[in-house]
Image (cartoon, rainbow, N blue to C red):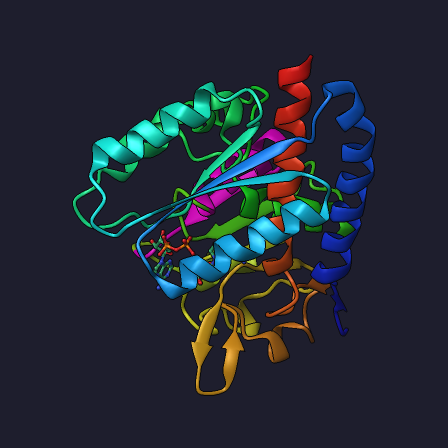
Amino acid sequence: MTARVIDGKAVAAGVRERVAAEVAELAPRLGREPGLATVLTGDDPASQVYVRNKRQACEEAGMRSIHHDLPADVAEERVLAVVDELNADQRVDGILVQLPLPDGIDQDAVVDRIDAAKDVDGLTAASAGRLAQGRPGLVPCTPAGVMELLREAGPPIEGAEAVIVGRSILVGRPLSALLLNANASVTVCHSRTRDLAATCRRADVLVAAVGSPRLVEGGWVKPGATVIDVGINRTDDGLVGDVDFDVAREVAGAITPVPGGVGPMTIAMLLSNTLAAARARAA
Ligand code: NAD
């Protein structure tokens, strides 16, 4: 069996089109464009590219981008003051503080200062708590994108055995809550998991979010499973995921490629979250 390759670019383009159409409907009711604020600290080139892409996508969707650039030696108090200002700004629906923050700044304190109603990255303790309790709220973008891809892949999530490799706050943990809320039976694996291969082999839905090139071998995939590869690893062979794609695709029912799978979904879901935040604030 050769797996269907899930086209993340196409799914992301569909989400972005839907968001743009809904923004065009909502803006006249709001009397303004929905607004996404980005806060960038320091001069890390990767963070600069990520923020530039997010701002551009935001404008392409018809939303307003508000941006704060802060120097690498900025004091924590100043970052907190910028977040307070954005929390109070009625034109701002979503706030994204690009991580990591410079050394010496308490990342948790800055993230938790964001008003939960504007937490479009879904990373505050308040948003994480809501998600863990199965209550409505804003959900981290990458795991939200994984759920969109799973819906697109087809087989029902309800009742499925789902295995996630990786337990980060950004991906593995929120995804475990999303899958549980969608009525999957969820196992979360990590660096101390005893028999990773055997656990993965049980999965109807297998998600790899580790950051280790081709860690998940083709032989770990249950025939017909849906495999979602969140990993992005730069190697001498170029960009590869956490799954050995060439072997796994011969076993799986559906699989995401790297690049072109989960990657494009993250920004699409950020736009979707900003729209949802604007709508909820207008209600
Ligand atoms: P992280 O480093 O915060 O977490 C990695 C997790 O993998 C940890 O929970 C750790 O316990 C687990 N792990 C490490 N080695 C392991 C092993 N040998 N066996 C089993 N588990 C192991 O990483 P993250 O932020 O969750 O990112 C994971 C990957 O996803 C990275 O490659 C990152 O670049 C990528 N990523 C992609 C997107 C996207 O938009 N596509 C977004 C976020 C992260």
13 versus 214 height, above or below: above
Q: Is residue 237 magenta?
A: no
The one of 25 and 130 positioned closer to us in this rendering = 25
Q: Point out residue 18 in the picture as x, y percentages from the top left corner.
A: 80, 41
Task: Tell me the quarter of the picture where residue 79 sits.
Answer: top left
Q: Which residue lies at the image location 45% right of the left edge and 19% below the top edge? A: 88
In the image: residue 202, left or right of residue 126: right
Task: Tell me the quarter of the picture where residue 192 sits.
Answer: bottom left
Q: Which residue lies at the image location 53% right of the left edge and 50% below the top edge? A: 163
27 versus 159 height, above or below: above
Can residue 74 be seen by looking at this rendering? yes
Quadrant placement of the N terminus: bottom right
256 versus 182 height, above or below: below
Q: Point out residue 147 in the picture as x, y percentages from the top left corner.
A: 65, 44
The one of 242 and 283 positioned closer to us in this rendering = 283
Q: Point out residue 131 in the picture as x, y percentages from the top left corner.
A: 51, 27
What stretch of residues is rendered in magenta?
A: 171-191
